[in-house]
Amino acid sequence: MKDHNKFVIMVHGGAWDIPETEHNNHLKGVEKAVLIGFALLNSGKDAVTAVIETVKQLERDATFDAGCGSFLNRDGEVEMDAIVMDGKDLSTGAVAAIQNVAHPVEIANLVRLQTEHTLLVGQGASRFAFNAGIDFFPTEKLLVGRELERYKELKKKKRFKTREFFEHIPKRDTVGAVASDAYGNIAVATSTGGTPNKLPGRVGDSPIIGAGAYADNYLGGASSTGWGESLMKILLAKSAVDFMSRGSNAQDAAQQAITYLEKRVDGRGGIICIDTKGNAAYAYNTPYMARAIADQTGLLHVGILRP
């Protein structure tokens, strides 16, 4: 049943060792994004619309590793991943290693709505976007100056381990949103520019169902962030939703999923969850994770430090 008196949306701006000099930008960024979702849900819009527009705001904010703030790969190019999942019918659309678009999450949703497929990658994903009328977005507009400098520094290194970025080196990470609307529908969207200095064609957890995102009206929803290679091994988002399906509330499920991530594969990351009762929660094992929550009463929480 429709109930305009109850909805909730939560966003994250990545889990990693965020430098204190960047805390304010992360907090402002996730707050602005979650309030966009709040306004849409408050006007009666559905959860899918809310998470897509919320993530589009994060993609246009160069603070985050998504859209215009994405990392460069080893060839100095920007390749992005994104996913959208509707918990009402489990319909999902995703893109991976897509180039020259401003909003990968928008293309992911077009895959969901306009094709028989779930995931399009590389040149095929970009061609699909342009054929659908999406404007070509040159790499120069996606490129943030500090990422060009980072790219040059990494090119000088003989050895480089991605895990370092989640524990000791200043960087940005994946963004995502999960929402439950006034109709009781749950939806999730996740978007990323991947990891710095990645091999061309590398795909992380974000566009993979169950790894970067999962939503089911009967179980709950979750969006993941962190070291993708480890998150994929345990399907972090689906693990959290499975814990909720077995009776855990959102907070317990989030913590259980992160605990399993660390114990099973020594992974680093974070997750945001909403259960079927509308409880929103988060957990992470990195030094920081930017996040924000809003419900029908307005903005509930904006934070970056551990509780």
Image (spheres, helix red, strand yellow):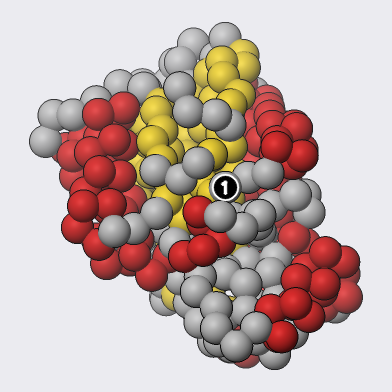
Percent position of residue 221, x then y: 35, 41
Percent position of residue 176, x then y: 54, 47
Direction from residue 187 to residue 153 in the image, left or right: right
Percent position of residue 111, x then y: 52, 70
* Residue underneath mark 1: 17
Q: Quarter-wise, where is residue 19 in the image?
A: top right
Q: Front-most of 234 and 91?
A: 234
Q: Quarter-wise, where is residue 80 in the image?
A: bottom right
Q: Residue at x 77, y 39 (%)?
A: 21
Q: From the image, which quarter does the N terminus lie in? A: top left
Direction from residue 90 to residue 56 in the image, left or right: right
Above or below residue 278? Residue 189 is below
Percent position of residue 277, x then y: 30, 21
Q: Residue at x 55, y 78 (%)?
A: 160
Q: From the image, which quarter does the C terminus lie in? A: top left
Q: Is residue 259 visible?
A: yes
Q: Quarter-wise, where is residue 153 in the image?
A: bottom right
The amino acid type, in three-letter code, at marker 1 is: Asp
Above or below residue 227? Residue 250 is above
Above or below residue 27? Residue 7 is above
Q: Front-most of 298 and 233?
A: 233
Q: Residue at x 34, y 65 (%)?
A: 230
Direction from residue 106 to residue 83 in the image, left or right: left
Report helix, strand or loop for mark 1. loop
Crowdedness near tag 1: few (<14), some (14–19) or many (≥20) residues, C-alpha within 10 Å:
many
Q: Residue at x 56, y 61 (%)?
A: 165
